[in-house]
């Protein structure tokens, strides 16, 4: 393959541009996380400032959480379809509009609406990670992903003390004006610095899937976030939980049938993706337990015997070291990922979190113990958050990186919401009473730390299968960055010209290095990303059909010649005995549960053949013309299967003759002594 040879000047320019893009995107992630926490120190004062109740004021946090969870998968999918830079600018514009609405409003409903619009900015993080894959040179990508993931904690850690300082010296509206200024500046920076990728996924937007998923996520997150206020057994909580689960049950079949789903459930169900997404829920739970538990330990009154009685400003300042750890760990996480693989980074991070929580159970009495324990959990969290986007991008098609990371972020939000609900439940159950007041007992925090340690260990165990699934890195040596990638499209059909749905098309270099893969939609269409023009190996496979491979010269924007999968995979073999092949024998295939799958007869030469059934365990039974039977256990997978049956009983070993067997089968055999 002819490849451009980059010069040293080109390398330097690529690294410089990569650093500028990385810095811009990281600032976007930090700003989003910052605005999520800026309002928290003011939250206790909002009932007085806005003349409302504590429960109503809590919607200023809930609205942001729900809006972010709803917007993330939707905007991430739109980014894959219409451009990542474009959707990033849309998210920034909506965020600035929400900040401006909050800055000029005095009424609670308008401020809640502004906070909901601010929540849309959460989608910037998965979209930013996908942009990094397109923009950064390959050697900078692990660092970029690590830094972008770390912005979640960096912004949160800086938000608390910054908000305390703002509120102490200015009007509370200033927390929104700061977000307006930062968001507007970043909008300009993204417009000038980030290039639009040419990678697109085809098809129309899945409106029904977006509505169903948004409704389901809203119901479930409201259940988790408001359950402690309403009561876990209240009718509002129970109805919302049931409605959310019912909507998920409706949404899944819809996504399986639609041509261009909002979330490709089949890709999400791939073991490598499913394991990482499950680990995302668990690590999100453990991460938020650290943040909430540490904050409460610092702020609980000293009369509880374990609290330090710090105000919001000083508690925020002592939370800052944990945020700094996130940023400091980014280069280390990137180095581990480059050298040992992202799965190693995820495992090491999960085990570090688990060990840190076990230590925190016993050492959470002094200020230095609480801060050091929080920092140690932050070390592990930084590693896990840095590893998961890399694992997701390795396991999904290049044209779906934004939507896949968006769904992963959504599941992480489910984990953080579950952590908040669990902490609320535990701290209201394990309590102590002092001077007429009710406070969480120290055992409540120990219980949460044990639960978080268990979640971290489970996340580590889920990582172990990923080592067996480890793949070679994508072959992007043809270019110093991914911005030159282009999309080629094609279609998979059968011998009759009908589309082959869910066929998997894998693209490799002639040397066998993986480049990209795609799954055909309902019309058999697929798209693949190529780093440059040249020859590629196209491997196509579908269940029940013989796979096909071919070399093709691919150009940007080219339509690949249709891939025709014409030959069906078969289950075949020969039936024979001591005298040779047995013709006219019945061969039946049944499931272990008893259902008949297929039955056929052997030819004169003893051969039989039937379409290959779906993978599983079966029983193959042979019945000869002279009523001899033989059964074999057969395991079928997605490959040609040959099962030869050698009969243990021959034709002359006391078996019935064919004519006699037929007469007995019909009841026409004369009895002895009867004329």
Image (tube, rainbow, N blue to C red):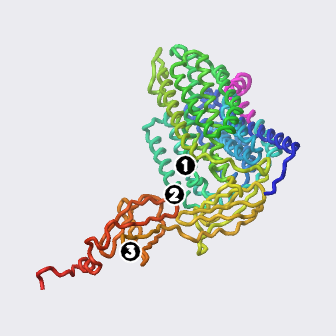
Asked if the stretch drawn in magenta spans residue 174, the answer is yes
Residue at image point 38% right, 77% down: 584
Question: Earlier along the polypeptide chain: callout 3 or callout 2?
Answer: 2
Question: Earlier along the polypeptide chain: callout 1 or callout 3?
Answer: 1
Residue under label 3: 582
Q: Is residue 173 above or below residue 297?
A: below
Q: Is residue 8 visible?
A: yes
> Which marked residue is nearer to the observer: mark 3 or mark 2?
3
Q: Secondary structure at mark 3?
A: loop
Label pair 2/1, CB-CB below 8 angstroms: no
Residue that lies at the very extreme toward the left in this rendered image: 673
**How far apart, in angstroms, are the residues tagged by discs 3 and 2?**
47 Å
Asked if the stretch drawn in magenta spans residue 267, the answer is no
Q: Is residue 75 visible?
A: no
Q: Secondary structure at mark 1?
A: helix
**Where's residue 490, x and y in %?**
68, 65
Residue under label 1: 271
**How far apart, in angstroms, are the residues tagged by discs 1 and 3?**
44 Å
Local crowd size for mark 3, using a 10 Å CA cut-off: few (<14), some (14–19), many (≥20): many
Quadrant of the rendered image containing residue 259: bottom right
Question: Earlier along the polypeptide chain: callout 2 or callout 1?
Answer: 2
**How far apart, in angstroms, are the residues tagged by discs 2 and 1?**
19 Å
Q: Which residues are magenta?
A: 159-180
Label pair 1/3, CB-CB below 8 angstroms: no
Q: Secondary structure at mark 2?
A: helix
Residue at image point 58% right, 55% down: 209
Task: Look at the magenta stretch and give its main secondary structure.
Answer: helix
Local crowd size for mark 1, using a 10 Å CA cut-off: few (<14), some (14–19), many (≥20): some
- Nearest the camera: 600 or 152? 600
- Nearest the camera: 536 or 445? 536
**Where's residue 624, x and y in %?**
34, 73
Residue under label 2: 253
């Amino acid at each position: 393959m002819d490849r451009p040879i980059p010069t040293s000047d080109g390398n330097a320019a690529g690294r410089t541009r990569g650093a500028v893009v990385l810095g811009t995107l990281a600032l976007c992630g930090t700003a989003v996380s910052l605005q999520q926490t800026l309002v928290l120190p003011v939250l206790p004062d909002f009932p007085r400032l806005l003349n409302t109740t504590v429960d109503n004021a809590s919607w200023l946090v809930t609205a942001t959480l729900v809006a972010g969870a709803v917007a993330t998968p939707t905007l991430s999918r739109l980014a894959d379809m219409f451009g990542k830079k474009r959707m990033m600018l849309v998210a920034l514009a909506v965020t600035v509009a929400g900040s401006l609405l909050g800055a000029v409003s005095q009424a609670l409903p308008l401020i809640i609406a502004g906070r909901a619009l601010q929540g849309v900015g959460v989608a910037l993080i998965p979209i930013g990670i996908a942009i990094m894959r397109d923009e950064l040179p390959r050697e900078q990508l692990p660092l970029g992903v690590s830094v972008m993931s770390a912005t979640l904690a960096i912004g949160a850690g800086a938000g608390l003390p910054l908000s305390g300082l703002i509120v102490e010296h200015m009007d509370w509206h200033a927390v929104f004006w700061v977000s307006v200024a930062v968001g507007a500046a970043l909008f300009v920076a993204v417009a000038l610095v980030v290039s639009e990728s040419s990678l697109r996924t085809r098809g129309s937007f899945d409106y029904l899937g977006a509505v169903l998923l948004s409704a389901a996520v809203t119901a479930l997150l409201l259940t988790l976030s408001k359950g402690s206020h309403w009561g876990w057994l209240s009718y509002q909580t129970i109805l919302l939980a049931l409605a959310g689960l019912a909507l998920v049950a409706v949404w899944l079949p819809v996504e399986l049938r639609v041509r261009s789903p909002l979330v490709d459930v089949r890709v999400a169900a791939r073991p490598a993706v499913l394991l990482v997404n499950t680990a995302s829920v668990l690590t999100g739970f453990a991460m938020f337990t650290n943040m909430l538990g540490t904050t409460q330990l610092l702020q609980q009154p000293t009369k509880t015997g374990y609290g330090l009685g710090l105000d919001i400003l000083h508690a925020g300042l002592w939370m800052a070291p944990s945020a700094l750890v996130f940023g400091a760990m980014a280069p280390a996480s990137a180095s581990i990922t480059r050298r040992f693989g992202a799965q190693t980074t995820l495992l090491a991070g999960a085990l570090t979190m688990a060990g840190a929580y076990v230590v925190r159970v016993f050492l959470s009495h002094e200020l230095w113990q609480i801060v050091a324990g929080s920092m140690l959990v932050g070390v592990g969290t930084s590693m896990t958050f840095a590893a998961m986007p890399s694992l997701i991008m390795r396991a999904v098609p290049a044209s779906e990186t934004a939507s896949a990371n968006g769904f992963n972020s959504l599941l992480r939000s489910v984990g953080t919401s579950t952590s908040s609900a669990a902490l609320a439940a535990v701290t209201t159950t394990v309590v102590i009473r002092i001077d007429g007041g009710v406070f969480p007992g120290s055992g409540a925090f120990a219980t949460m730390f044990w639960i978080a340690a268990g979640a971290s260990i489970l996340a580590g165990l889920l990582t172990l299968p990923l080592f067996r699934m480890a793949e070679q890195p994508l072959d992007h040596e043809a270019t110093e960055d991914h911005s030159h990638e282009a999309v080629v499209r094609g279609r998979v059909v059968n011998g009759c010209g009908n589309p082959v749905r869910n066929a998997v098309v894998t693209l490799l270099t002639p040397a066998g290095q993986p480049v990209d893969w795609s799954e055909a939609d309902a019309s058999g269409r697929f798209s693949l990303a190529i780093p440059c023009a040249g020859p590629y190996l196209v491997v196509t496979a579908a269940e029940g059909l013989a796979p096909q491979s071919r070399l093709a010269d691919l150009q940007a924007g080219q339509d690949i010649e249709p891939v025709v999968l014409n030959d069906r995979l078969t289950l075949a073999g020969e039936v024979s005995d001591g005298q040779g092949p047995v013709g006219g024998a019945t061969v039946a295939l049944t499931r272990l549960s008893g259902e008949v799958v297929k039955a056929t007869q052997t030819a004169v030469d003893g051969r039989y053949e039937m379409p290959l059934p779906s993978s599983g365990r079966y029983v193959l039974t042979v019945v000869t013309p002279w009523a001899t039977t033989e059964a074999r256990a057969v395991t079928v997978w997605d490959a040609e299967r040959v099962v030869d049956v050698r009969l243990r009983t021959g034709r002359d070993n006391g078996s019935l003759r064919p004519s006699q067997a037929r007469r007995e089968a019909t009841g026409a055999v004369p009895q002895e002594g009867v004329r």
